[in-house]
Amino acid sequence: MSKIHPDALGLLARTLDQGEWRTGDAPRSGAAPAGVARAGHWARTGDEVWTGERRDTLAAEFKATLERGTHGLCFSPYLEGQAPGDRIKEGQIRERLQVIRPHTRWIRTFSCTDGHEQTPRIAHELGLKTLVGAWLGTDAEINEREIEGVIAVARAGHADIVAVGNEVLLREDMSEDELLAHIERVKAALPGVQVGYVDAYFLFEKHPRVTAACDVVMTNCYPFWEGCPRDQALAYMQAMFERTRVVAAGKRVLVSETGWPDQGSPFEGSVPSREGAMQYFVDTCRWAEQDGIEVFYFSAFDEAWKVGAEGDVGAYWGLWDKDGAPKFA
C-alpha cells in the first residue's frame, strides 16, 4: 500500500493545473532549477516550533536514518577553493567517498571530465553503485569531451546508470533535438546500459520525446525552490514524483535530486534551517524506504563555490560540511 502523504493528492491536483513558470537568470547546477513553478496556494501554517524535546527526538531519528543508509547521495568531491573547471585529484575523491561509504549504496556524479571521470571507478572499488552523469551545456567542445568521457567510463564497466545531461532544457542550453541526438548517441554506444536524462519533473511533461528516449527517467524535485513551506515539502515532493511517474508510463523513475538547505536566505515560503534540513532528510528517506522509491539525496557535502549562482543558500545543502565533517551530529 502506498505511503504517500495524504496532502500530496490535493497538491497533485493543483499542480497539474499549473503551467506558468518563472525562469531565473543563472543555472543552479546540481541543486535548484533555473525555472521554478508558480505553485502558490500554500496553506499558512506559521513558523515551525522546535522545543528541546522535539529537537532531541529529531536528532535521534536523523542519526538512525543516516546509520541505516540512503539509497543514493549526490556526490561532488570539491574542496575549499575549488570549483567546476578545476582539476580533481584521485586522492580527494577517495577520501570523500570513504566518508559517505557507510551511509549510501549509490552515488550520483555530474561530470566525466577534469578528473571526475575517476569517481565511478573508485566508487566501484569501494562497493558503491554509480549513476554517472555527463554535464552538457552551451560549449560544444566541452559537451563532446563529456560524451566521450561517459562512454569510456561505462565501457570500462563503471557506470550502472548513465545520465546524459542535467537540467539542460530547464536552462535552455540546447534544443530538444540537440539533446535527443546526444541521448541516442550514448544509447547506441552503450547497449546493455540504462541511459536517461535528468531534469525538473515538469519538463518530462513538456518534452514527451525526451521522456520516450529515456530508458530510465530521472527527476529533480525541489520543494524549496518553489517556495514551499518545509512542513508541506514532503507532500509536494511526492506530487512532483507522481507527475513524473504518470508521463514515464511504466518506465523506471528515480528522484535524481532532492534536499533542503540548513542555512541561507529564505526563498518565498521556504526557510532554511538546521531542523528543517534534518526533518526533510528523515521524511524523504522514510518515504523512499516505505514505498521503494530510488532517491538520490542532494547532497553529500556542502559546496562553497555554489554561492555565486544560488546566493548564500547554495553553499549549505550537504549532510557533511565543506571540510567533510558531519553537520548534524
Image: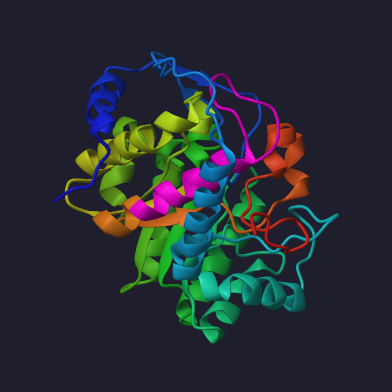
User: Left or right: 90 with respect to 170?
Assistant: right
Give the quadrant of the C terminus: bottom right
Furthest residue to the right?
81
Q: Nearer the viewer, residue 324 or 59?
A: 59
- Residue 84, image x and y in percent? 73, 53
Q: Which colouring convention does the figure follow?
A: rainbow
Q: Quadrant of residue 327?
A: bottom right
Q: Nearer the viewer, residue 269 or 246?
A: 269
**Residue shown at 17%/51% (left/top)?**
250
User: Left or right: 191 with respect to 6?
Assistant: right
Against 16, residue 58 (above or below) is: below
Against 49, residue 133 (above or below) is: below
Furthest residue to the front?
53
Q: Is residue 277 magenta?
A: yes
User: Left or right: 302 with respect to 214?
Assistant: right
Q: Quadrant of residue 261?
A: top right
User: Left or right: 286 with respect to 59?
Assistant: left
Q: Does residue 172 appear in this view?
A: no
Furthest residue to the left?
1
Q: Is residue 247 magenta?
A: no
- Residue 244, image x and y in percent? 29, 40
- Residue 102, image x and y in percent? 54, 75
Against 42, residue 295 (above or below) is: below
Q: Which residues are magenta?
A: 261-286
Against 26, residue 288 (above or below) is: below
**Residue shown at 25%/47% (left/top)?**
212
- Residue 149, image x and y in percent? 58, 68
Q: Does residue 323 appear in this view?
A: yes
**Residue shown at 66%/53% (left/top)?**
141
